Image (spheres, helix red, strand yellow):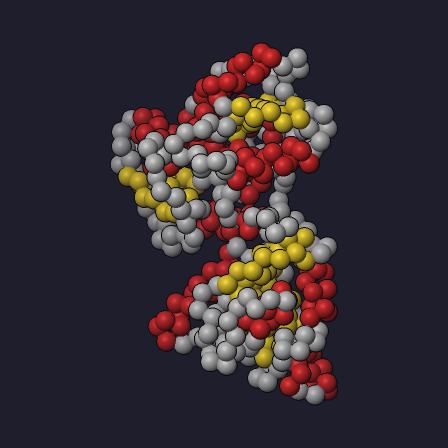
Amino acid sequence: MRTTPRSDRLHIAIFGKRNAGKSSLINALTSQPVALVSDVPGTTTDPVYKAMELLPVGPVVFIDTAGIDDAGELGRLRVKRSLSVSNSADMALLVVDSLTGPSPIEQNLARRLAARNLPVVGVLNKSDLVSPEEAQELLERCRVEIGVNFVAVSALTGSGIGALKEAIIGKAPGDWEGPPILGDLVKPGDLVVLVVPIDLEAPKGRIILPQVQAIRDVLDSDCYCVMVKENRLKDALERMTTLPRLVITDSQAFDKVASQVPVGVGLTSFSILFARHKGDLKTLVAGARRIESLKPGDSVLIAEACTHHPIGDDIGRVKIPRWLDKKVGGPLKYTWHAGGGFPEDLSGFKLAIHCGSCMINRREMLARLSALREAGVPVVNYGVLISYLHGIMDRALAPLGCTDGGASHRGTEGVI
């Protein structure tokens, strides 16, 4: 559980006013001094993340945020950053100070969270500083005024923390993980081949996260897993007495791999699998079809969820622009965005291209897709785009049970 990537954990954000005891609460929940605690308002400035295991939910990450009532220019920036956490949160804890009670600030925040369809658990903190009768009155007042059920706790003494964990477990969404990576596309005993190019940008001594996660999903599905570089694929297939159920390739090698995989063997890419696992495959396929309307000079956003130092023939900064310019018949205007956050002004872009999103969770990826949809900007991810540009998108989508962008995941019967 400790090595589970943050992007694969249930994200639980903690919101509330300054000095409501949010940092003390995350320390109590994790039984560790994760967050700095002080009586000085505004001690927490940036979101603080702490990963732990919460049975029976599994791996989670708690996110401590700055007070939503912070003041001044710097305070407003802190509030903005805190509220942006709701883009990646799967559920929220809304903390109210027993000494001050609920206010319009928490009411407005609760409405904001409800608009994002976030499950919310209310936390009445510092309950040790009021009488039991007062605590009960405050619980009812919070429920009525904020519209959320609250649990009385004391982050200082630990009272009520067990009940709060039970409330979190009861409210945790059951669908936060999205479709499996590939487990529903195979059946026990199937052979799966992973094609992993080793180039300048491959991390030294290891393979990248989507490949690791795909291997684990193959093993969890009780299947056989074979890994090869693209230059050994033909030889590997010739040595097999039984053809594989599925071949998964790095998108950059799509064209070369497609020419070697026999018709009738499922072929797709890590990026396309993650398009379904982390996002909305139908939206991304629709974005690929909008490439035909691009003209030289149009503005294109290329977004990556992580930051890395580009080396040589970088996929997002060199290869994709080169392929896309050739397809369009002239140079396009590219804007690159890497890492956390997302551009606020999306106007003017004719297309957005997103990476495979292995470093962010499903909730954040869906929030990014929603922002682009609201701005009227079609979006496609790396794998879907590359398969489209190489004329093999329908074949690459077929193992997922669709050739027209339908994104529903299905059982193993008739997939290939």
Q: Quadrant of the C terminus?
A: top right
Tell me if residue 385 can be seen.
yes
Identify the residue shown where x is 45% and y is 21%: 255
Q: Position of residue 181 (x, y in %)?
A: 61, 37
Q: Position of residue 103 (x, y in %)?
A: 55, 79
Query: Does 409 sit left or right of 280 as displayed?
Result: right
Query: Does 199 sit left or right of 413 as displayed?
Result: left
- Image quadrant where residue 388 sits: top left
- Image quadrant where residue 415 sits: top right
Of 247 and 397, the residue lying toward us? 247
398 above or below 302? above
Query: Does 57 sit left or right of 113 as displayed?
Result: right
352 above or below 412? below
- Image quadrant where residue 123 sits: bottom right
Query: Does 202 sit left or right of 30 as displayed?
Result: left
Q: Position of residue 303 (x, y in %)?
A: 40, 44
Furthest residue toward front: 205
Tell me if residue 263 can be seen.
no
